[in-house]
Image: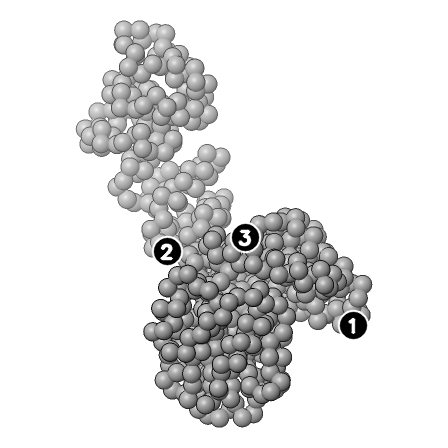
Amino acid sequence: MLLSIGMMVKNEEKYLDKCLRALSPILHNLDSELIIVDTGSTDNTVEIAKKYTDKVYFHKWNNNFSEMRNIVLSYCKGEWFFCIDGDEVLEDCSDLIKFFQLEMYKNYNSAAIYVKNICDLNDETNYSILSSLRLFKKDSDFKYVNAVHNQPLYKKPTKVLSINCKHYGYISNDKDLMERKYNRTVAILKNELKENSENIYYWYQLSVSYGMHGDKEKAVDCAFKAFKIMKMKIPEVQVKNYVYVYTQLALCYLIVKDFEKIEHICIEAVQVGIEHIDIYYLLGKSQYLMNKNEDAINSYGKYLWALSKYKDRDDDGIQVYYYGKKEYVFFDLFIIYKRLGKFEQALQYFGKIENTHILTNFECIEENLHLYLDVCNYDGLEKFYHNIITKYEIKDNFIIYLEKYMSKHQVNIKKIKGILRDENSYMLLLNFRLAIQDNDDSLVSNTEIINRVSELRLNELYYFYADILYYYMRYSLHEFIILAKKIGEQKNIEFFKYLDGTYKAFRQLIFNILFFIFKVDFKFLNLKKVQHKSF
């Protein structure tokens, strides 16, 4: 037999069917077998596995990954062994099939694939990537070693296959999954460190585990411990082989927002000869967050260069956390050039962005509002509104940040109306604002406007709709009373606080209503109570 696909599984029902379905083309096109060893599943894992193979075996979990991998190996009859986990899904296996069908395997002893570690189920563009050794010629020397992050004793030469594998095992918003993996891994690592307290790799992995669990200070302490041991034990000429130590320490400093230390550790990494995607990204990010704009441009430029060279380099088996962050870097560069007043360059980088999670983010809306409105570029804002806001149906978010901007800056309301165009409640609000601005009382007698206002559910609208109430307080006490009767006490307090902070004349207007227009019964409004709580 040419190939054995081997897996060890436990409670993998969430992704296992998808995983095994993706392996089917290999099993159908090559002389191959599928071996699955279950280590104690209590869900539907075994039932799913038996749909795809009759070679399902059972062994109790013994807290040693390598020993369990070697048990899987003992069942395999193939000349070659392919390792995959139950929470991993191959995107396309055609390159692996060609590797055997075209007899390329005769020139190699091992092969690697690219593993994408998905970080967020809601955004699968948010991932780290790793060139991972998964395919091995199964000779008498081949086995796995180390209790936690089992490492294969493989032989070169190694072929890097153009295969991407999505790994769902470290999704940070799957809390139950994270807790299980944390407890399992930390216990094993602590036990290993009792035996070898100066093992750089184990301290690094313990830091990773603490970081993923949210134990920030412990993560920093373990990363720094790994860094100190490296500095003491590793010759200076070999330090550049410990990229993962520098990267983890910088990542931990990012978690605790110590941007100066990130910059320091990344500059040191570059000085010892490290040219790595994550180092350049973290250096650029720290400089961006410290407003070191020119330095950030330079560092991000090196990140983009390293990214373009990633798949041309020799396989180093080092995880790259920021491989999928190119468009996020474009967004940072957009903001940097906007800070520098270089709007043309800013828009060039913004135009490179296609990621909907970036384009629909609140920060994107806010930054573009400032970009265009700070220089009164309403034509540019209109293009942004129709190309992004309308396209992705995020008008409510746009309005919220437009209001935030208008609370501190003057804008041309007529031009804003021309951009929005929609005949909705917000457009109605803008009509009232224009009337307040122009001292125009004509809306009082406008039947269409009165009818549209009567249909508003003011208790459910944002605080800034209080401008409609203010208009009628100024120009029509009758309509004000009709509206005020529809509004609950808490909403009136919210409205009055907003109006008090927006209009200098508001307090005097309230006092006039309270003390001079005594013929009107305001008990329904409890106006004195509302006024007292608002000011």
Name the residue that disc number 2 marks.
Answer: 387
Q: Quadrant of residue 399?
A: top left
Element assignment for label 1: helix
Estimate the spatial distance between the alpha carbons at disc 1 and disc 2, rounded to whole Å: 52 Å
Of callouts 3 and 2, which one flags the residue occurring earlier in the amino acid sequence? 3
Q: On the image, which quarter does residue 67 sit in?
A: bottom right
Q: Mark 1 touching mark 3, by CB under 8 A?
A: no
Q: Residue at x 46, y 25 (%)?
A: 501
* First reached walking from the N terminus: tag 1 or tag 3: 1
Few, some or many residues within 10 Å of mark 3 (<14, 14–19, 20+): many
Percent position (x, y) of residue 118?
A: 48, 62
* Left or right: where 383 falls relative to 284: left
Label 1 and label 3: CA atoms lie apart by 38 Å
Q: Secondary structure at mark 2?
A: helix
Q: How far separated are the C-alphas under marks 3 and 2?
A: 19 Å
* Residue pointed to by mark 3: 335
Q: Mark 1 vs mark 2: give the one in front.
A: 1
Looking at the rendered image, the disc whose residue lies closer to the viewer, 1 or 3, is: 1
Residue 343 lies left or right of residue 43; in this view the side is: right
Mark 3: which amino acid?
Ile
- Which of the two discs, 1 and 2, labels the residue nearer the N terminus? 1
Which amino acid lies under the numbered mark 1 shown in the image of this protein? Val
Residue annotated with mark 1 = 237
Please determine whether, in this image, residue 417 is positioned above or below residue 243. Answer: above
> Residue 233 vs residue 251: left or right?
right
| Location of residue 126 with respect to 25 vertically, above or below | above
